[in-house]
Image (cartoon, helix red, strand yellow):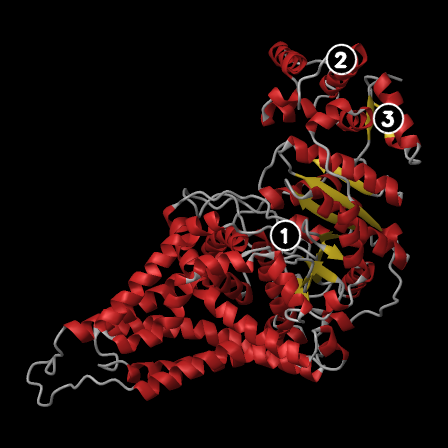
């Protein structure tokens, strides 16, 4: 055996995993980090095609009882939303001076009707969820279709798949370890394998991933069950990473559970998902409702509280209206692999520009394609044990929103795709409206301001038509306006107040007590109202940038608490502050009394800089927590998995980097062992790598670029040569360049 093999066996032998070292056909030692390949085809289908029945579910789902019930419910929802919107629009026309007879007023009414429809849809979704949760009766809840102790067949093997890319390595593997150990406690671990699928292109992160994977396997005895793969070519981002897994190992498993880098799931939740999928052979995707936890900044704690309090209403409401034609959010969900491979590979969107190319928001599209092929997509809204984390501050959330905005706008091109279920066409539409509502709201406010300017600066026209006998008197009805604003505010805030009614008994204490709970809701309403205009301007900018074809950089979000400095806040919000002051000044000069109507918007823009800074602070978040504000049950009584994740993050050593992989013998053996030895290289490539090694000899590892370090990490001979060089320098007492 070569020296690398000896080093690997000596190191892994202490962890009882020396069998993970294999000798390839050329006699080179390799560390096996993935199972044997079982290749399967997985190719995209044309968008103009249609889902066929060559892999249909065991029983037809198009005319089942739940499908008919869902159709009836949606007709009711449509009638409620349109009826309420019509009533509100009539009231709005009465508020306008000329009652909607002028072109400018018609434009205002159209925008108002669209925006009010969006508000009404959210209200009735939350109301349905409240009724479902308050009654506790749901004949279509998929969570009640399998016994909690039903045996899982040996053939129902499941892969836990976590795609990562330049993530916070200690947090990723801490959450994965907590999930693994929780699953082991259920006694069902033998039916699960874990895959960490890395698209990381930063060499320091990649070295840290390899070391963390080895430490995790050694700690829990996970060699041969916890696998790690680094993908050389990052095609199609996350969806491409999942597709690559399916092509290589998909046939080994019946199901896969997709995790995000910040996901944590209990073993009971994972085992229950498999039981539910087994009990519902026509279900293609079952999505859990992840609970947000683990952050300490004020902003993230407020978001955690909001999702914990109001999220269940909306999630249960989505289930009520959608049933087996529901959302899929891309993580913390179980997927039946065979139909996913057959129907859910994504073709590029044709054309040029920002709204073409590779699908970005792939989850909505995959759910639509799965349902098009006849398989159900369900939300298991009442299954506990599924967790995730929120962005730590407003600016980090907005960076994520920009990516989601472009992805959702791209999906709008698929709304008329042949064969899609109408429910999923609506899902695409709501995804677009989540961001398009911002420029529509901005346009509504702008036109309202222009309407005020006309009313103030332009003399009224009493006779607007030939041979008009009676004058048309412009009139304002402030009492109607107050009533309309009050009604709209009721639709917006009623779900938040209804959520308090669902908190009973011990749950009240886990939210800090009844008084703290009410105070938290009211505080969240105020801060959210201040943040809404800021998000409006950002989302308006994102929509315009996407439509103009401006590129978006997709980077992994932060997985740890991070603060917003004053300089960054000034750079990102300075224009908003100036705009708010100018807007308020213009309205005041036109009509001082009207300033009160737009005060919530302009005031929020004026204070956006300190609002962004202070809400990002951990100290303020912890201070509020001590007073019981924004406390959630997962903090009052932390689940074992969340407590273990936090402990493993605290105990994790500092992540190693590329220089450590050169100097440390064990880490060097790991990195070299994972690489593929290529003794025969093109002459030019061999010379380039030799020059890189020579540069390290002269100037140290820090002289290499990121691309050069990445290239060397994939070359076992080069990494071994670098380590031998570092060892020789250390033995000879030579002074090594600082790293």
Marks 2 and 3, how far apart in space? 23 Å
Q: Residues within 10 Å of mark 2 (few under 14, many from 20)?
A: some
Mark 2 or mark 1: which comes first in sequence?
A: 1
Residue at the spot x=82%, y=29% of the render?
Answer: 31
Dot 2: element: helix
Using the rendered view, name the quadrant where residue 668 is placed: top right
Q: Nearer the viewer, residue 286 or 647?
A: 647
Which residue lies under the disc numbered 2? 729
- The answer to whether residue 72 is seen in the rendering is no
Q: Which mark is residue 363?
A: none
Label 3 sits on a secondary structure element that is: helix
Residue 561, numbered label: 1
Q: Are marks 3 and 1 in contact (CB under 8 Å)?
A: no
- Residue 421 horizontal/vertical position (percent): 55, 64
- Asked if the residue under mark 1 is in contact with the one under mark 2, i.e. CB atoms within 8 Å, the reply is no
Provide the residue designation for mark 3.
8
- Mark 3 crowd level (few <14, some 14–19, many ≥20, 10 Å Cα): many
Among the 4 quarters of the image, the one containing residue 313: bottom right
Q: Secondary structure at mark 1?
A: loop
The outermost residue toward the bottom is: 470
Q: 677 left or right of 93?
A: right
The part of the image, by quadrant, that contains residue 96 is bottom left
């Amino acid at each position: 055996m070569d020296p690398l093999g000896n080093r690997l066996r000596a190191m892994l032998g202490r962890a009882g995993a020396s069998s993970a070292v294999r000798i390839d056909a050329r006699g080179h030692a390799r560390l096996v980090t993935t199972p044997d390949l079982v290749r399967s085809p997985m190719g995209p289908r044309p968008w103009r095609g249609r889902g066929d029945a060559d892999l249909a579910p065991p029983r037809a789902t198009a005319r089942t009882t739940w499908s008919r019930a869902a159709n009836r419910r949606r007709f009711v929802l449509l009638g409620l939303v349109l009826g309420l919107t019509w009533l509100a629009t009539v009231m709005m026309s009465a508020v306008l001076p000329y009652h909607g007879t002028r072109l400018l007023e018609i434009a205002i009414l159209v925008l108002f009707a669209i925006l009010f429809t969006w508000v009404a849809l959210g209200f009735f979704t939350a109301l349905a969820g409240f009724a479902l949760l308050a009654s506790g009766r749901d004949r279509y809840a998929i969570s009640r279709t399998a016994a909690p102790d039903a045996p899982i067949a040996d053939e129902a093997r499941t892969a836990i798949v976590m795609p990562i890319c330049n993530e916070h390595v200690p947090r990723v593997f801490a959450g994965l370890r907590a999930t693994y150990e929780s699953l082991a406690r259920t006694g069902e671990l033998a039916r699960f394998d874990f895959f960490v699928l890395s698209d990381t292109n930063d060499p320091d992160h990649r070295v840290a991933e390899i070391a963390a994977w080895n430490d995790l396997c050694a700690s829990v005895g996970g060699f041969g069950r916890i696998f790690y793969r680094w993908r050389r070519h990052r095609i199609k981002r996350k969806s491409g990473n999942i597709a690559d897994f399916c092509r290589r190992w998909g046939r080994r498993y019946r199901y896969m559970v997709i995790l995000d880098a910040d996901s944590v799931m209990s073993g009971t939740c994972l085992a229950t998902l498999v039981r539910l999928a087994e009990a519902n052979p026509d279900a293609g995707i079952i999505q859990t409702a992840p609970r947000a936890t683990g952050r300490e900044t004020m902003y993230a704690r407020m978001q955690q509280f909001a999702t914990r309090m109001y999220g269940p209403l909306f999630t249960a409401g989505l289930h009520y209206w959608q049933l087996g034609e529901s959302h899929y959010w891309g993580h913390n969900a179980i997927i039946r692999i065979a139909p996913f491979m057959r129907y859910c590979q994504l073709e590029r969107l044709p054309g040029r520009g920002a709204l073409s190319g590779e699908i970005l928001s792939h989850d909505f599209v995959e759910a639509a394609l799965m349902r098009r092929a006849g398989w159900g997509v369900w939300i298991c809204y009442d299954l506990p044990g599924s967790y995730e984390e929120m962005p730590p501050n407003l600016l980090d959330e907005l960076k994520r929103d920009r990516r989601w905005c472009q992805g959702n706008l791209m999906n709008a091109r698929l709304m008329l795709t042949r064969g899609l279920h109408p429910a999923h066409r609506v899902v695409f539409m709501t995804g677009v409206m989540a961001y398009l509502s911002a420029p529509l709201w901005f346009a509504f406010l702008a036109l309202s301001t222009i309407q005020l300017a006309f009313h103030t600066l332009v003399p009224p026209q009493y006779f607007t038509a030939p041979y008009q006998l009676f004058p048309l008197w412009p009139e304002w009805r402030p009492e109607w306006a107050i009533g309309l604003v009050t009604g709209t505010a009721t639709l917006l805030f009623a779900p938040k107040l209804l959520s308090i009614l669902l908190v009973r008994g011990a749950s009240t204490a886990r939210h800090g007590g009844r008084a703290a709970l009410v105070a938290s809701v009211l505080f969240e309403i105020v801060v959210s109202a201040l943040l809404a205009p800021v998000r409006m301007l950002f989302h308006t900018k994102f929509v315009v940038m996407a439509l103009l074809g401006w590129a978006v950089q997709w980077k992994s979000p932060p997985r740890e608490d991070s603060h917003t400095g004053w300089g960054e806040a000034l750079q990102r919000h300075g224009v908003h502050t100036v705009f708010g002051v100018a807007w308020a000044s213009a309205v005041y000069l036109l009509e001082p009394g009207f300033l009160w109507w737009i005060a919530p918007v302009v005031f929020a823009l004026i204070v956006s800089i300190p609002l962004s800074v202070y809400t990002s602070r951990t100290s303020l978040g912890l201070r509020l927590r001590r007073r019981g504000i924004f406390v959630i049950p997962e903090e009052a009584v932390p689940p074992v998995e969340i407590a273990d994740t936090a402990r493993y993050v605290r105990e994790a050593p500092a992540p190693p980097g590329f220089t450590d992989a050169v100097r440390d013998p064990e880490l060097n053996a790991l990195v070299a062992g994972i690489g593929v030895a290529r003794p025969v290289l093109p002459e030019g490539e061999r010379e380039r790598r030799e020059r890189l090694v020579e540069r390290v000899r002269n100037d140290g590892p820090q002289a290499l670029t990121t691309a050069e370090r990445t290239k060397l990490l994939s070359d076992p001979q080069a990494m071994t040569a670098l380590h031998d060089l570092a060892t020789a320098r250390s033995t000879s007492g030579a002074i090594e360049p600082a790293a």
